[in-house]
Image (tube, coloured by chain):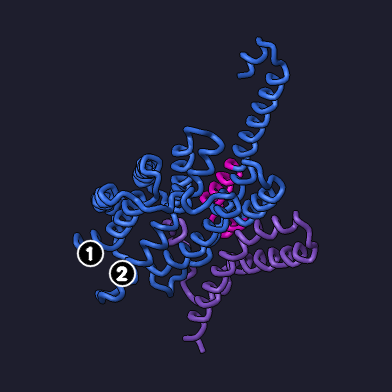
Chain colours: A blue, B purple
Amino acid sequence: LADRAGAGPWPRLARLARIESRARAVTLVRVAGMLAVVGLAEATFLLAGLVTGALAALAVLAVLLALAGVHRGLPEGRAAIALSVLPLLRVLSISLPSILVPQWIWHAEIGIPVIVATALAARLAGLGASEIGVRRPEALETIVAAGAGLLLGLVAARITDAVTIVSDRSILTAALASLAVIIGAAAAEELLFRGLLLRVAEGIVAGSGIAASALLSTLMYVATLNPRYIVFIAAVSLVLGVITRRSGSLGPALACHATLVWSQLILWPALLG
Amino acid sequence: MVDAQIASHLPGTPLQSLAFPVDGWVAGFLIALLCIRLLLTAAKSPTARTGLRVIDVAVVPLFIGFAAIVYGRIQEILPLG
């Protein structure tokens, strides 16, 4: 547009186009800086341990909140508020697990605050529920995705040598654990990565939103310290991003993720021993 | 979300839990955010209103997390009594 307008009789239009492209470049640089800071906090967590990692995540959270306030109403402000959920997730995942509490409760303890944070961040970024994919999905697509999730869960259980997170054989515990895993792990992550972050990333780098959200969700799984699982998560995140964009709803991706994580942590370890 | 890096370094006893500093930092960070929130509320300007909404993105989930931390610590300490 800048070239065509500059060659024609509209130099003012060319100047506006140049200003717009410069503003876009500034936005991209700022968002890249925010991503680098989030990545640095994760690297600190991996290399320096839990305590220093939590301190780094809290510092990054404070910086991103400040940037969200300074750049309010701009794309970088929306990026800052969406990205701030990541260090929040890291801090909660370090401080909430306790060895005296059953492992399945950890998922609910961490997932529920993350869902609340994602909803508040989406509201602040001016995104309604339907814009982040909370809308009625197509039934057949959702059922197929849920079936695929069961098979992916088997692969994930094999890669991670998963053991069941249900401590006893009671049906009530199994039902509560299933609910905790589906809400705390699947729903929280889908709302954050395929809902909020995918939508915000597409608003900044059109066409690369899926890659950006997959990169961020993979980044949060690097701490599993299992290279095969990290590659698996990256591939699944890309596929879930594509599914979400194609269907326009989080439903199929959520169904796939829910059956994946449920079968990985509860079903397959119980069946296969 | 709870990775090998975390699961392998969890405090193993109630005393180790009490000595784990991250919970205290979460509480301190939450108190700092609440103080900033009070200051912004007192400012009563349109800019401050946006600031309040930004801070709420962290305050509300951290408060839920803090409640869970306190509950967990009480569960750990009660058997000692």
Q: Nearer the viewer, residue B24 or B59?
A: B59
Q: Which residues are magenta?
A: A35-55
Relative placement, left or right, of A86 versus A160 is right
Callouts 2 and 1 on one subunit: yes
Q: Quadrant of residue A121?
A: bottom right
Residue A100 place in picture, x, y as percent: 43, 75
Q: Chain of mark 2?
A: A
Determine which residue is flagged by label 1: A270
Residue drawn at x 31%, y 51% as measured from the top left: A256
Identify the residue at the far front of this view: A9
Residue A251 place in picture, x, y as percent: 36, 52
Q: Nearer the viewer, residue A24 or B31?
A: A24
Residue drawn at x 51%, y 64% as measured from the top left: A113
Q: Secondary structure at mark 1?
A: helix
Separation (CA) of disc 2 from disc 1? 9 Å
Determine which residue is flagged by label 2: A166
Kind of residue at disc 2: Val
Around disc 2, counting alpha carbons within 10 Å, would you say few (fewer than 14), some (14 to 19), or many (20 or more)? many
Asked whether A79 falls inside the magenta stretch, the response is no
Kind of residue at disc 1: Ala
**Is A10 located above or below residue B11 in the figure?**
above
Q: Nearer the viewer, residue A127 or A257?
A: A127
Residue A8 place in picture, x, y as percent: 66, 11
**Is A179 located above or below residue A138 in the figure?**
below
Decide which of tag 2 and tag 1 comes sooner along the chain. 2
